[in-house]
Image (cartoon, helix red, strand yellow):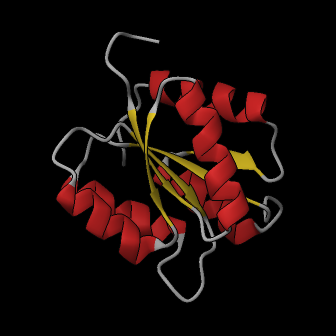
């Protein structure tokens, strides 16, 4: 990884997934801002003045904004942010459509630490701009 750590906003309503993902990412040198849901993520993002390179978010977080809705809001504030969705609903056509339309990356749950790191790295390297 480069000299300056990349910052990831990690949003997942499942404590075990959020905490394990943060541990794996921090172990690789990423700076991780953790949020349990969209409201908390937006507050964190508003108060964090540095660059956030990646939004890593669960797709489904009831009753708050979905990951896709959250990404749309965040891209209004920080249009250069990359997005990586995670979900256990990978076969859901609605999820597939939202991921495709948002030009974001996707990682199906469950995933291994290695799969998470590889997907994060490839998403950060991908230079496509948001739609």
Residue at 67% from the left image edge and 25% from the top image edge = 118
Residue farthest left in this picture: 49
Q: x and y percent of residue 131 in the render?
A: 36, 49
Relative height, residue 51 to residue 43 (above, below) = above
Which of 127 and 30 lies nearest the eye of the viewer?
A: 30
Residue at 79% from the left image edge and 62% from the top image edge = 88
Relative height, residue 50 to residue 86 (above, below) = above
Q: x and y percent of residue 73 in the render?
A: 31, 66
Residue at 54% from the left image edge and 57% from the top image edge = 57
The image quarter in which residue 3 lies: top left
Q: x and y percent of residue 123 in the render?
A: 53, 31
The image quarter in which residue 15 lies: bottom right
Q: x and y percent of residue 50 in the render?
A: 20, 40
Residue farthest bottom in this picture: 63
Which of 88 and 98 lies nearest the eye of the viewer?
A: 88
Would residue 1 appear left or right of 108 to someone viewing this image? left
Would residue 37 appear left or right of 46 to someone viewing this image? right
Relative height, residue 95 to residue 102 (above, below) = below
């Amino acid at each position: 990884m480069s000299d300056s750590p990349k910052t990831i906003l990690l949003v997942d309503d499942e404590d075990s997934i959020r905490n394990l993902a943060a541990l794996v990412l921090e172990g690789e040198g990423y700076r991780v801002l953790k949020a349990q849901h969209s409201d908390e993520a937006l507050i964190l993002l508003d108060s964090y003045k540095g660059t956030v390179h990646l939004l890593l978010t669960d797709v489904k977080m009831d009753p708050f904004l979905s990951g896709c809705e959250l990404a749309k809001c965040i891209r209004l504030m920080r249009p250069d942010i990359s997005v990586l969705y995670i979900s256990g609903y990978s076969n859901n056509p609605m999820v597939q459509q939202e991921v495709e339309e948002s030009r974001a990356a996707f990682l199906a749950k469950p995933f291994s630490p290695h799969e998470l790191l590889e997907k994060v790295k490839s998403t950060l390297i991908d230079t496509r701009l948001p739609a």
